[in-house]
Amino acid sequence: MKYSDINTFTFVDHQIQSPQSNIVNQNPVIYRPSAKAQRIKFFIPYSAIEIREAVKKMNTSFYHPGQKLWSIVNTRENLEELKGILGSGVSIESPKTNKIPIPAQKLGTETEEALEKFEQCIILKGYSRNTLKNYRNELVQFFSYFDGRDFKSIHKEEIESFVAMLISKHKISSTKQNQLINAIKFYYEKVLGKPREFYDIQRPKRA
């Protein structure tokens, strides 16, 4: 069971900046995860050798060198074990991200027609209302980016570049990244009848 109630606070599933202030203070830090976050990220000071060695022995523990953070799978049991290892000096903070909001754009007539065809197709294939809603939201973003283009003529490489841009610039979450890729694949393979395609994109890894 995933856990987000750390003394009644919530976490995010975004890329976290290195905690410079706590590197100076030499205090362990746990970053609040969202209910959907698959992992809990935390900071261990370089001087805390015993703590670091204990964390290494935890199941699912992993070090992220680019962020200088550790993480474990997001469960209540793991969180309680982690808090015990980090001790009373641990602080709990909201993560700082470089996430840039994705601007909304008005859709053109051709884009609206493409969305209508998508909705008809997904309904006829018996997908759930929730899947329809999620896929539609992702396709609105995709269509807005390529508005004015013939969607059939958009190349695989352009789609890969679009998704990569959202990952690097807007720091989209693992859940959103999965939904976006699946929505694009559904549109091209089910609505337009194109062959199944593999997109060379850094899909999120399951914990």
Image (cartoon, helix red, strand yellow):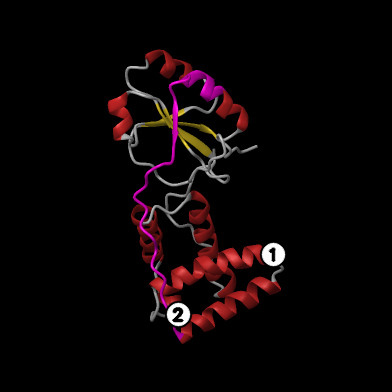
Asked whether residue 87 is drawn in magenta, I would say: yes
In the rendered structure, the answer to whether residue 159 lies left or right of residue 1 reads left
Tell me residue 13's x, y (percent). Answer: 48, 46
- The one of 63 and 154 positioned closer to us in this rendering: 63
Tell me residue 60's x, y (percent). Answer: 53, 28
User: Which residue is depicted at the point 64% across and 75% down?
Assistant: 121
> Is 108 placed above or below 104 here?
below
Asked whether residue 158 is drawn in magenta, I would say: no
User: Which residue is depicted at the point 49% across and 27% down?
Assistant: 61
Tell me residue 119's x, y (percent). Answer: 61, 75
The quarter of the displayed image where residue 59 is located? top right
Q: Given the image, on which type of amino acid does mark 1 rest?
A: Ser
Residue at the disc numbered 2:
107
Magenta stretch bounds: 81-108
> Is 174 placed above or below 69 here?
below
Q: Which mark is residue 128?
A: 1
Mark 2 crowd level (few <14, some 14–19, many ≥20, 10 Å Cα)? some
Which of the two discs, 1 and 2, sits closer to the camera?
Answer: 2
- The one of 188 and 99 positioned closer to us in this rendering: 99
Q: Which mark is residue 167?
A: none
Mark 1 crowd level (few <14, some 14–19, many ≥20, 10 Å Cα)? few
Q: Earlier in the sequence, mark 1 or mark 2?
A: 2
> Is 106 placed above or below 185 here?
below
Q: Can you say which quadrant of the picture contains the C terminus?
A: top right
> Is 7 placed above or below 151 here?
above
Query: Marks 1 and 2, Cα distance to the nearest angstrom?
Result: 24 Å
Magenta stretch, main secondary structure class: loop
- The one of 24 and 154 positioned closer to us in this rendering: 24
Q: Given the image, on which type of amino acid does mark 2 rest?
A: Leu
